Image (tube, coloured by chain):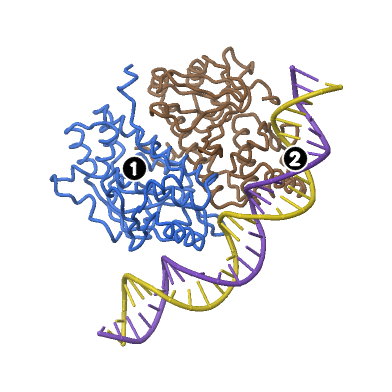
Chain colours: A brown, B blue, C yellow, D purple
Amino acid sequence: MNDHSPGSGRSDGPIGLDSPLARKLHRMAALSDDDRQRLAVALSRARLVEAHADILAEGDDPRAVNVVLDGWACRYRQLADGRRQIVTLLLPGDVCDPQVFRKRHVHHALCALTPITLAQIPGGAFQELTARSATLEAAFLHERLTTTAIQHEWTVSLGRRSAIERTAHLLCELHARLEAVGLADAVSCPMPLTQIDLADALGQTPVHINRVLRDLRSQALLILRHRRLTLVDGARLRALALFDPAYLFDDDITGSAQET
Amino acid sequence: MNDHSPGSGRSDGPIGLDSPLARKLHRMAALSDDDRQRLAVALSRARLVEAHADILAEGDDPRAVNVVLDGWACRYRQLADGRRQIVTLLLPGDVCDPQVFRKRHVHHALCALTPITLAQIPGGAFQELTARSATLEAAFLHERLTTTAIQHEWTVSLGRRSAIERTAHLLCELHARLEAVGLADAVSCPMPLTQIDLADALGQTPVHINRVLRDLRSQALLILRHRRLTLVDGARLRALALFDPAYLFDDDITGSAQET
DNA sequence: CGTAAGATTGATTTCGGTCAACTTCAGTGG
DNA sequence: CCACTGAAGTTGACCGAAATCAATCTTACG
């Protein structure tokens, strides 16, 4: 990643109390100071992976939970004839459930798109974390549900949105997700993806992505250069994309309605 | 559903010990008789929904787990202008994690594609079920991972497979999934989906689905009529679709490699 | 300063969508 | 029993969005 501050390297606490993940979880379910403290400890074991390298956790504790502290990664699958599809984009604060490694053959690969810092919470430590705090447990559950919602929305985009809608939608989503972890301001955010990456995520050709972006630019909807995205007219862009951020931020209703 | 036997109505036990879900879980992690027994009890509370009706669990225990006992359903999302995308197909034995209902706004709908029978396991009962049997817990976890893998594969299909590959792939997947729950023989299975349903799942037009099916038929790859699918040349069909069933059946390695 | 990856643009093709008509079929009621 | 109805399936003619092919051009960086 070229373009943004070190992310987890904030200096508001001895061990990064304010990680992207902490921000996101806090938004989902208000964390106590104690929760934040223990989360920070759990995230303290970091690992670095350089850009374009595969992130392989084979041999790792399959119950461990990997968390992106800084940088971008993706989960992708390559077909026999070389066609490549990015299935998930992992941003700072995202949880990469490596339980997939319980399966014998890994069908997809995880790859760093930028230099990336990962925290690895061992299975046991993670279980203890959620066992001790119902709030943290709820927050992690909610995080997982959000991930699923994102996946569903990608399916909708690939199936039913046109190229321009789909592209606009993804950019809106990424901006919103980054904002939720404190890595974006109201109108702009880092955007380390190349047009090739975008094409692989959006199921299109790099050439066509280029034309779509030109189109979006010429409509004065956004600016995209120097690995940074600026939403010039966010409202119009979201309308074009049929983007409704609710699937990302829908707050947990635990405690509000159902108190079993 | 028109075309298959009542599914859960087998007579090999007083309360359906051999439900589709039991078969699937057993394949993932060998269940003890006791596991099967308690699973069957958990599934005993059934609910009927007629075809085309929405399956709404609002107000239900959000921690409850719904299981399809018989019939087909789908999760779909409709865009503001009416475009519709089926995001998930739910077959007998599939678990419909209604934790989504913890979120305030439901962004997608669940809809019965055929008359359908659902079992509802209350949250508490489900927790007890998995707490008492590590095998069942592992099996349910594996089930969830498989669901995720299917979702990923759909993303790949929609993004990178051509219309004919994508259609062939879905039909292969459905046949394989049905076989895993004992509802298909080696070469054929029920196929209650209309061409409109297929189009909505595959991100295409009904007209084009029709042409693709004609093409597949004319290549003597499959027969599809009377709501029944027959794979005439399964090997060639799977090759055309770039279909690798590993993502569905990859066995859990718990116990084989890692014995923490 | 040279090089390679990424970005951009034009010309052309193709896959899948759109529009419109027509057929088939299952279910319903006279 | 058959005529009616509406949904699903089928086909053709045509169109348009995105892919493909092929050059450049730009930029980052060693």
Q: Is residue A239 among the parts visible in the rendering?
A: no
Q: Residue at x 41, y 29 (%)?
A: A105
| Residue at numbered disc 2 | A223
Q: Are marks 2 and 1 in contact (CB under 8 Å)?
A: no
* Picture coordinates of residue D30, whole percent (x, y): 74, 17
- Secondary structure under tag 2 reads strand
* Picture coordinates of residue B253, whole percent (x, y): 34, 26
- Foreground pick, A26 / A117: A117
Q: Is residue D19 shown left or right of residue A156? A: right
Quarter the N terminus of chain B occupies: bottom left
Q: Is residue B38 above or below residue B193?
A: above
Do callouts 2 and 1 point to residues on the same chain? no
Quarter the C terminus of chain B occupies: top left
Image mark 2: chain: A
Amino acid type at mark 2 = Ile
Label 1: how many Cα within 10 Å (few below 14, some 14–19, many 20+): many
Amino acid type at mark 1 = Val
- Secondary structure under tag 1 reads strand
Q: Residue at x 32, y 34 (%)?
A: B140
When asked about the image quadrant of residue B31, the answer is top left
Q: Is residue A66 shown left or right of residue A173? A: left
* Picture coordinates of residue A67, whole percent (x, y): 52, 24
When asked about the image quadrant of residue B113, the answer is bottom left
